[in-house]
Image (cartoon, helix red, strand yellow):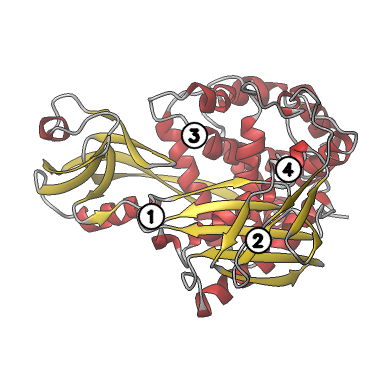
């Protein structure tokens, strides 16, 4: 205590001869000895020790290790498919920064039938994820892996000045979390479409889901949304910086490419920030972020964009910006089944954030703070379960009795409630067949990566 963070350390693991060890920490010898250059590195290196599946693959000139627990949970063709996705997503992510800052990267994935959804945390050359077993072989698992790997550049290295250097004695809130998390989420989607895991239509569907999330949230400042993770609001906006930041990244990318005839891009912004700020051992400020955008876009003035859509609460300019990439946002109203209980997906599952006064959900005893485990026979394990609920009960009668399983504190409860319906806006992002050649080039640049030379 008190000696600072610059001291080196070694870790020696004593374990059974037939057990595996997996970690991103540098190996010193074959007997289970590892080295960390300083305290920051030491605490950034989780370990798996025990019986689990472990194999490796060389992709884009680097080694990748995949450790999955319990043994056999990700095997056969499912494991081969996951490896193929990892190999495909790496080149487009590395191309954004024009460098890969590791010789080997370790993916630690733990699957638990009782765990709701999926959670993961980034590290310098690894990440640790905990998932429900239902995530095995799912698109959700691949998306989280892409997100966490991109974090190795954007957060573990390139990060806001508010987070530099890391502190361990207090919180480090920042209004730029939308860049660190939201833009990372944007590039997790781009890595999949640029790597051939998704086709363009799948990418548009992901954008449309995020548009819906932003529109349903109402007037929330993107900077305020960034602070929400430290404030923990209960109005359902606690994680909005992911979706709202992601589509902000898309809009900025389109504006930059349009202003430069596709010679500039958000890719170049992220690369220059990485080279300059992380390269000199510092974080970036809000002013530096916008200055680099101006440089890459040949002086494009985004003062109004920042004031209205990042610091301010104006609705996003979908109809003005998306056409610049040959895209359009289509809207329609749909009648959707529901129980009148708003939920927020956190690390423990679907947490009830509010219940409609006088609604069947309120009458049945559902309370704010409950975690919904299943509704109408549908297990709530990830966001796809919500879509399954919509499909299954779309034509049911209002008032249909639904069985709800929920967790309240340490107790699991089973109650009955009634089905309701709401009118909601549906969104679809589609290519415009009448788009100009310039707009088509912008769209192709987004989807394929790179810029016009």
Q: Which residue is mark 4?
A: 42
Assign the C terminus to one quadrant of the image.
bottom right
Q: Residue at x 79, y 40 (%)?
A: 269
Q: CA distance from mark 1 to mark 3?
A: 18 Å
- What label sits on residue 22 in the rendered view? 2
Q: Which residue is mark 1?
A: 384
Residue 218 vs residue 260: left or right? Answer: left
> How many C-alpha atoms fall within 10 Å of the one at disc 3: few (<14), some, or many (≥20)?
many
Residue 435 seen in render? no
**Nearest-to-viewer mark from 1 and 2:** 2
- Report x, y in % for residue 168: 67, 27
- What label sits on residue 438 in the rendered view? none
Residue 387 vs residue 284: left or right? Answer: left
Decide: marks 4, 3 in contact (CB < 8 A)? no
- Report x, y in % for residue 359: 15, 30
- What label sits on residue 239 in the rendered view? 3
Tell me: residue 212, above or below residue 50.
above
- Report x, y in % for residue 60: 78, 67
Q: CA distance from mark 4 to mark 2?
A: 15 Å
User: Quick one: 45 or 49, which is closer to the camera?
Assistant: 49
> How many C-alpha atoms fall within 10 Å of the one at disc 1: few (<14), some, or many (≥20)?
few
- Report x, y in % for residue 45: 68, 48
Q: Circle 1 — which element?
A: helix
Quarter-wise, where is residue 114 in the image? bottom left
Quarter-wise, where is residue 385 in the image? bottom left
> How many C-alpha atoms fall within 10 Å of the one at disc 2: few (<14), some, or many (≥20)?
many
């Amino acid at each position: 205590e008190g000696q600072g963070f610059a001291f080196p350390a070694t870790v020696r693991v004593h374990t059974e001869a037939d057990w595996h060890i997996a970690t991103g920490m540098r190996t010193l010898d074959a007997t289970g000895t590892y080295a960390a250059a300083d305290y920051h590195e030491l605490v950034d290196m989780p370990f798996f020790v025990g019986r689990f599946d472990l194999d490796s693959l060389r992709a884009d000139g680097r080694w990748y290790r995949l450790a999955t627990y319990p043994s056999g949970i990700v095997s056969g063709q499912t494991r081969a498919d996951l490896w193929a996705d990892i190999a495909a997503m790496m080149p487009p992510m590395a191309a954004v920064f024009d460098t890969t800052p590791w010789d080997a990267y370790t993916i630690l994935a733990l699957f638990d039938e009782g765990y709701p959804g999926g959670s993961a945390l980034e590290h310098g050359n690894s990440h640790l994820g905990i998932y429900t077993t239902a995530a095995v072989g799912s698109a959700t698992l691949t998306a989280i892996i892409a997100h966490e790997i991109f974090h190795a550049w954007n957060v573990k290295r390139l990060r806001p000045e508010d987070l530099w250097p890391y502190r361990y004695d207090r919180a480090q809130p920042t209004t730029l979390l939308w860049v660190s998390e939201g833009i990372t989420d944007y590039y997790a989607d781009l890595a999949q479409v640029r790597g051939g895991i998704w086709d363009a239509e799948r990418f548009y569907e992901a954008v449309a889901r995020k548009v819906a999330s932003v529109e349903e949230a109402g007037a929330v400042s993107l900077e305020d949304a960034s602070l929400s993770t430290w404030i923990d609001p209960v109005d359902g906006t606690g994680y909005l910086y992911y979706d709202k930041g992601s589509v902000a990244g898309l809009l900025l990318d389109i504006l930059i490419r349009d202003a430069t005839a596709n010679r500039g891009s958000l890719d170049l912004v992220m690369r220059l920030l990485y080279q300059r700020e992380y390269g000199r051992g510092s974080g970036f400020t809000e002013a530096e972020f916008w200055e680099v955008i101006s440089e890459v876009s040949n002086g494009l003035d985004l003062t109004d964009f920042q004031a209205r859509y990042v610091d301010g609460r104006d609705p996003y300019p979908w109809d003005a910006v998306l056409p610049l990439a040959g895209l359009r946002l289509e809207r329609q109203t749909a009648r959707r089944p529901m129980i009148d209980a708003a939920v927020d997906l956190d690390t423990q599952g679907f947490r009830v954030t509010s219940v409609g006064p006088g609604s069947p959900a309120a009458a049945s005893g559902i309370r704010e703070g409950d975690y919904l485990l299943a509704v109408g026979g549908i297990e709530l394990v990830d966001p796809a379960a919500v879509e399954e609920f919509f499909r299954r009960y779309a034509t049911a009668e209002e008032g249909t009795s639904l069985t709800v399983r929920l967790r309240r504190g340490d107790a699991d409860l089973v109650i009955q409630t009634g089905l309701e319906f709401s009118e909601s806006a549906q969104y679809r992002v589609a290519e415009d067949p009448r788009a100009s050649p310039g707009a088509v080039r912008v769209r192709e640049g987004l989807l394929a990566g790179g810029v016009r030379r």
